[in-house]
Amino acid sequence: MTVERTRDLNWNAPRRGVAVALRQLAQLEQAGGGSRGQIEQFWYDFYERELTGWAVPGGLQKYRRELSGRGIVIAAGSAYFRRLVYQLRSLQSFGCLVGTTVEVYHCREDPLTDPEIAFLWSEFAITPVLIDPLFPEAPPKSIKLLTLKLYGALASRLKEVLLVDHDAVFLESPERWFEAREYQAEGALFFLDRQLHPGNYGYVQWLLEHFPQPYSPAVQRGDVVSQRSSFQQDSSLVVLNKARGLLGLIAATRLTHPDVTSGFRKNFADDKEALWHGFELAGAAFA
């Protein structure tokens, strides 16, 4: 294997260094520790530490070994507690709280109160997890309500997760999406957002410069690049196999950090479009 030696890991200029490094890390992971030479192992260790150390301090391989099962991950805050309870009752009516792991995460920006935590336990046998202490290496002010869902996905040790917004409303059990053909094929399923505000808002050119070539069909035919809409992904429901899309999830979360001043943060709000950006950057598959 030929290792492209780049130390340009500046997330503010991901067109070159980060994209190359993420793909190199994925290739080295596939090679496996037993078949890697000293040079390859050096670069694997370097990329793993620089790119993912803040998210999975124990290393990617250890993290993947800890993954098992499937379930639902919900991000919520005290200001939205009533919506969270409504959603949990809805999931309960579909039988999702019986035999299915449901994890609720909150953060210091808007933590659940002690009475709210006690209520969730008494009504649903769910103990919410305060997420901030789980990521001591994350940049200051990076964990907040609008990025909490991404951190919840990383914190969870579920292998397959439904990432759900606290205000999402379901008419049937969302667990059916685990069986979707597209998800089974690609390991990640994203949903298109509504088409609003067509036109070029100044970031189409940045996108084309930002994503590695050749462009994927999702980029070429996407609503943003084709200027049909200023939105592309509805992030209120995401279906993800983390064993297959972990690097994409880490890249998406990293793009939302305050110290990243690239075109992404200038043009998109927090986790709204972060997942498909991160997956494209990491070369991770999704449908």
Image (spheres, helix red, strand yellow):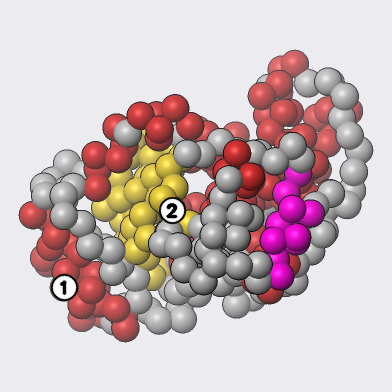
Say which amino acid is labelled 2: Leu
Q: Is residue 208 magenta?
A: yes
Residue 32, percent from left and from top:
68, 22
Residue 239, percent from left and from top:
39, 45
The secondary element bearing badge 2 is classed as strand
Image side of residue 59 versus residue 70, left or right: right
The secondary element bearing badge 1 is classed as helix
Location of the N terminus by quadrant is: top right
Q: Report the magenta residues as a range.
A: 202-212
Along the viewing direction, whichever of 228 and 76 lies nearer the viewer: 228
Say which amino acid is labelled 1: Phe
Q: Residue at x 91, y 38 (%)?
A: 5
Along the viewing direction, whichever of 183 and 96 lies nearer the viewer: 183
Q: Which residue is mark 1?
A: 119
Image side of residue 119 versus residue 284, left or right: left
> Which of the labelled discs sits on residue 192, or is there none?
2
Q: Residue at x 18, y 70 (%)?
A: 85
The disc, 1 or 2, on the residue closer to the chain's N-terminal end is 1
Q: Residue at x 22, y 62 (%)?
A: 169
User: Of tags 1 and 2, which is closer to the observer?
Assistant: 2
Q: Is residue 260 visible?
A: no
Magenta residues, dominant SS class: helix
Residue 118, percent from left and from top:
19, 73
Real-space CA distance between mark 1 and mark 2, rounded to the nearest whole angstrom: 35 Å
Q: Quadrant of residue 104?
A: bottom left
**Number of numbered discs visible in the structure rendering:** 2
Q: Is residue 186 magenta?
A: no
> Which of the labelled discs sits on residue 99, or is there none?
none
* In the rendered image, the vertical position of residue 223 relative to residue 261, given as above or below: above
